[in-house]
Amino acid sequence: MHVHFNIFGLNIPAYGLMITLGVVVANLVALYFIRKEGRKFDDIILIEAYCLLGAFVGAKLLYIIVSFNDIDWESAKTLEGLSNLMSSGFVFYGGLIGGIGMILLAGKVHGVESKYYLKNYIFAAPLGHAFGRIGCFCAGCCYGMEYHGPGAVVFPHGSFAPEGVELFPVQLVESACLFIIAGVMIFLKKRGKSAHLIEIYMIGYGIVRFVLEFLRDDAYRGVYFGISTSQWISMLAVVGGIVLWVINSRRNTSKESGLQS
């Protein structure tokens, strides 16, 4: 793993580089479908701008909420301390919620079909997130519990993870699961079966995240009644995904019955 990549003599943070790569790849896949469907790429760029802003604010806010008592607020009063607080510490689910909220707002403000793009291009979320988790591995954040079995990883000095200790590679496992979820969604989208992409994402990632939270050992995740904040949200996501699947299935059945009659 590398905390930084040396490219042309420049030390580029691996975490930021992988996130950027994830955004680029997700956009390229989205562009393929946009051209195929004859839609405007400008709409995606507009929606994405709103989404990224909402994701940043949401991820930071949820981090502050779950880590409020552990943040050095005295230090945050200084320019350096505030910079450190704003540049580190993010919770994915907060970013997801904030991003979706801003996508819907973009639809209201600019009159674009935000709900259509959200429903049909939601695969971009797990695809970009998969690259982001590789970035987490490179930086050593979101690290796993102590583990001495096959695939154990040891982080060096300078990473966020404890150095010299064998840990479970939870970031890479989550990344692999996200690539699988995104791959299934893209496959279904390509086959013209995109009716339940949102539900597949909610249920699939909700289950993956709930299980993998037990294998993490990083601090400041918020634990309530023995369950982390992300696990509570994961359970809501799974239940919500199932309910949404049932509602949409019944709605589609009603439409088909109406057309046949």
Image: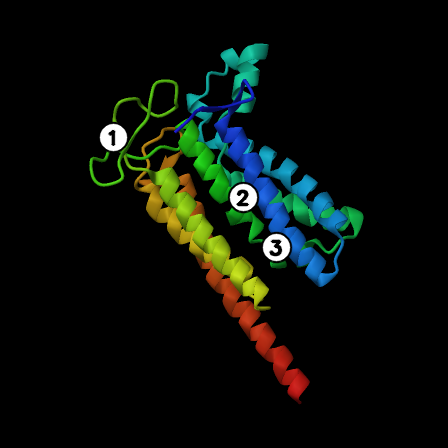
- Closer to the chain start, of discs 3 and 2, is 3
For label 1, the residue is: 166
Q: Residue at x 62, y 59 (%)?
A: 120
**Closest to the observer: 261 or 183?**
183
User: Is the C terminus in the top left, top right, bottom left or bottom right quadrant?
Assistant: bottom right
Give residue 88's mark.
none
Q: Quadrant of residue 99?
A: top right
Question: x and y percent of residue 153 in the render?
Answer: 29, 32
The Cα–Cα distance between marks 2 and 1, rounded to whole angstroms, is 27 Å
For label 3, the residue is: 121
- Closer to the chain start, of discs 1 and 3, is 3
Q: Is residue 188 left or right of residue 155?
A: right
Question: x and y percent of residue 243 in the render?
Answer: 49, 63
Residue 252 at least partly seen:
yes
For label 2, the residue is: 128
Question: x and y percent of residue 37 in the render?
Answer: 71, 62
* Up/down of 210 relative to 199, above or below: above
Which SS class for mark 3? loop
